[in-house]
């Protein structure tokens, strides 16, 4: 018996004025999602806890059964794993931007003219930098972005960003965020690195003459999926951060095909070799960040058309369909609202709910649960959970 967790990123929404007080899920024609709801048990889910606004990173950790408050100290390590860097315990990691600064280190462009080529060459130069007390490991990622790992003894993630987050301000000095000698030491290593990286990049004579650091986090200690649940897991995603989470959880990361149709078909094929697959579909979230209601409705319908094979699949296996958080079209960002969830499979106690949307599933048999409840529910239905007591 296999399980597929299909996360439609930010597909949940609040009632939208432009849609006459309905949500995109309530407006869209989506017969396959509704068929799953009709055959499954439904409910609403708080990604972490009621009213807590979450990022896709923290909520995916919760959905996979990890406690984000224990394992998440910042985005950096997950981004680093997402680009394929191997983290070790004790490492700290940052997300970085190549940027353009003037001679006074005032940021002129946080994206270095949206640099897209030649960052691999810059990365090679950066990796030659030697700072006493820590090893520098840098890797470029998409466009102007990159990741930095600092490796060494007695490092702390309790340090501030060097990124001022707006153009027109000076690159910040990294500061210790607590009183520990480790944080002070780490801050001084990073300030020395910032000076050196500016020198090294200036010699390259391009737009990119500085690296801005943000999102520092410590390499998390995650029990692997196999250790935690005794099952094998894979993940299909298009964003680095979700791939990074999956890698750190010891899951196999598979590249996603372009069309939704092919992704679902490919997913079902992958499940021949794994017990569990997480698929993240990112686009609905982006439509909400862009305040584009029509696009969001369109995307829901497009995704829905690809889900037909799941109706057959869920006769013998389990399918979880949900949103990882609400992304509000009016607010243009994630909100703390609950999200709809449906669990479909051979032995679920199906309820009377016939539609997959925020209000309909609130009447379902799962009632109101939290992100971290999903994996136990799923494992239990698969008869893979451990008994507590005699
Ligand atoms: Zn998300
Ligand atoms: Zn988002």
Image: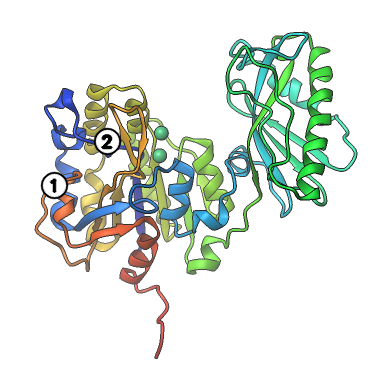
- Name which residue lies at 19% across and 51% down: 36
- Judged from the image, the quadrant occupied by ligand 2 is top left
Side of 76 where 361 appears, left or right: left
Q: Mark 2 points at which residue?
A: 303
The mark nearer the N terminus, 2 or 1, is 2
Residue 89 x/y as whole percent: 71, 55
Q: Residue furthest front?
A: 179
Q: Mark 2 and 1 residues: CB-CB less than 8 Å, in contact?
A: no
In the depicted structure, whether residue 189 falls above or below residue 293:
below
Q: Name the residue under label 1.
A: 355
Q: What element carries label 1?
A: loop
Side of 336 where 273 appears, left or right: right
Q: Nearer the viewer, residue 390 or 302?
A: 390
Residue 193 found in image quarter: top right
Residue 298 found in image quarter: top left
Name the quarter where the C terminus is drawn.
bottom left
């Amino acid at each position: 018996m296999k399980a597929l967790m299909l996360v439609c990123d930010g597909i949940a929404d609040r009632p939208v004025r432009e849609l006459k007080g309905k949500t995109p899920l309530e407006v869209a024609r989506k017969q396959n999602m509704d068929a799953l709801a009709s055959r499954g048990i439904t409910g609403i889910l708080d990604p972490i806890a009621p009213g807590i606004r979450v990022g896709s990173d923290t909520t995916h950790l919760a959905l996979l059964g990890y406690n984000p408050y224990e394992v998440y100290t910042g985005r950096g390590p997950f981004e680093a794993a997402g680009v394929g860097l191997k983290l070790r315990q004790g490492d700290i990691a940052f997300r970085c931007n190549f940027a353009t600064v003037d001679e006074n280190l005032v940021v002129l462009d946080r994206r270095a003219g949206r640099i897209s080529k030649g960052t691999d060459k810059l990365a090679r130069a950066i990796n030659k930098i030697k700072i006493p007390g820590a090893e520098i490991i840098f890797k470029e990622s998409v466009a102007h972005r990159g990741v930095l790992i600092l490796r060494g003894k007695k490092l702390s993630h309790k340090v501030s960003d060097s990124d001022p987050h707006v153009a027109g301000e000076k690159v910040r000095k990294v500061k210790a965020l607590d009183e520990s000698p480790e944080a002070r030491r780490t801050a001084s290593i990073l300030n020395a690195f910032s000076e050196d990286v500016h020198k090294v990049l200036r010699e390259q004579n391009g737009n990119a003459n500085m690296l801005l650091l943000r999102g520092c986090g410590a390499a998390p200690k995650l029990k692997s999926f196999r250790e935690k649940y005794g099952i094998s897991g894979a993940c299909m995603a298009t964003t680095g951060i979700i791939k990074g989470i999956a890698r750190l959880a010891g899951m196999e990361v598979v590249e996603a095909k372009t069309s939704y149709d092919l992704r679902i078909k490919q997913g079902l094929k992958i499940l021949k070799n794994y017990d569990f697959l997480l698929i993240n579909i990112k686009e609905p979230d982006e439509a909400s960040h862009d305040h584009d209601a029509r696009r969001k409705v369109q995307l829901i319908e497009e995704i829905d058309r690809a889900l037909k094979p799941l109706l057959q699949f869920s006769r013998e296996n389990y399918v979880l369909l949900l949103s990882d958080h609400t992304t509000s079209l009016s607010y243009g960002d994630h909100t703390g609202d609950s999200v709809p969830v449906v669990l479909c499979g051979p032995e679920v106690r199906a309820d009377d709910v016939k539609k997959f949307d925020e209000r309909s599933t609130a009447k379902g048999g799962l009632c109101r649960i939290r992100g971290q409840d999903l994996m136990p529910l799923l494992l239990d239905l698969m008869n893979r959970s451990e008994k507590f007591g005699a």
